[in-house]
Image (cartoon, rainbow, N blue to C red):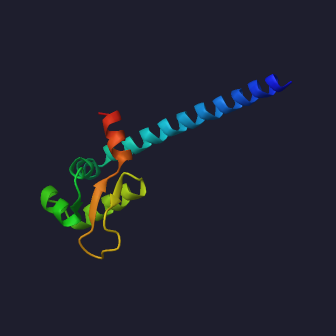
C-alpha cells in the first residue's frame, strides 16, 4: 500500500515537473521573440553587460532617450535588466540579469 502511494506520488511529481519545465521553455521562447521584435531591446541587452545609464545608451545607439527608457522599462518588467541604483532620480545604472545572460547564451 505504501509502495503504491509512493509510486503514485512520484508519478504526479514527475508530471508536474515536466509541465513546469515545458512552461518555462515556452516562456523562454516568448522572451526571445519579444527581444527579436525590437532592435533596441536586442542592442540594449548586448550593451548592458556592464552597468550604463540611459544617457550612455542614447549616445551609443543614437536614438531618442524616451525610446531607451521605454525599452529598459519593458526589459526590467521581463526580468532581463535590473536597475543598479533604483533610489536615484537621475543617472540610474542598468545591467543585464543572470536570466538575460543565460537566455542569450541559450539562444545564440
* Quarter residue 15 falls in: top right
Looking at this view, name the residue that lies furthest to the bottom: 89
In this rendering, would 33 be left or right of 42? right
In this rendering, would 40 be left or right of 59? right
Residue 43 drawn above or below residue 63: above
Q: Quadrant of the N terminus?
A: top right
The percent position of residue 32, horizontal first and vertical second, equals 37, 41
The percent position of residue 28, horizontal first and vertical second, equals 43, 40
Residue 94 drawn above or below residue 2: below
Residue 45 drawn above or below residue 76: above
The percent position of residue 81, horizontal first and vertical second, equals 34, 55
Q: Quadrant of the C terminus?
A: top left
Residue at x 22%, y 53% (from the top left corner): 50
Residue at x 81%, y 23% (from the top left corner): 4
The percent position of residue 48, horizontal first and vertical second, equals 24, 53
Looking at this view, name the residue that lies furthest to the front: 2
In this rendering, would 79 be left or right of 54? right
Amino acid at each position: 500500500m505504501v509502495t503504491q502511494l509512493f509510486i503514485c506520488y512520484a508519478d504526479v511529481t514527475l508530471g508536474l515537473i515536466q509541465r513546469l519545465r515545458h512552461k518555462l521553455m515556452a516562456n523562454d521562447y516568448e522572451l526571445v521573440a519579444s527581444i527579436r521584435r525590437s532592435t533596441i531591446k536586442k542592442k540594449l541587452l548586448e550593451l548592458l553587460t556592464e552597468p550604463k545609464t540611459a544617457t550612455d545608451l542614447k549616445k551609443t545607439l543614437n536614438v531618442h532617450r524616451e525610446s531607451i527608457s521605454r525599452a529598459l522599462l519593458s526589459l526590467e518588467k521581463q526580468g532581463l535588466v535590473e536597475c543598479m541604483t533604483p533610489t536615484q532620480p537621475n543617472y540610474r545604472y542598468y545591467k543585464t540579469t543572470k536570466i538575460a545572460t543565460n537566455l542569450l547564451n541559450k539562444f545564440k
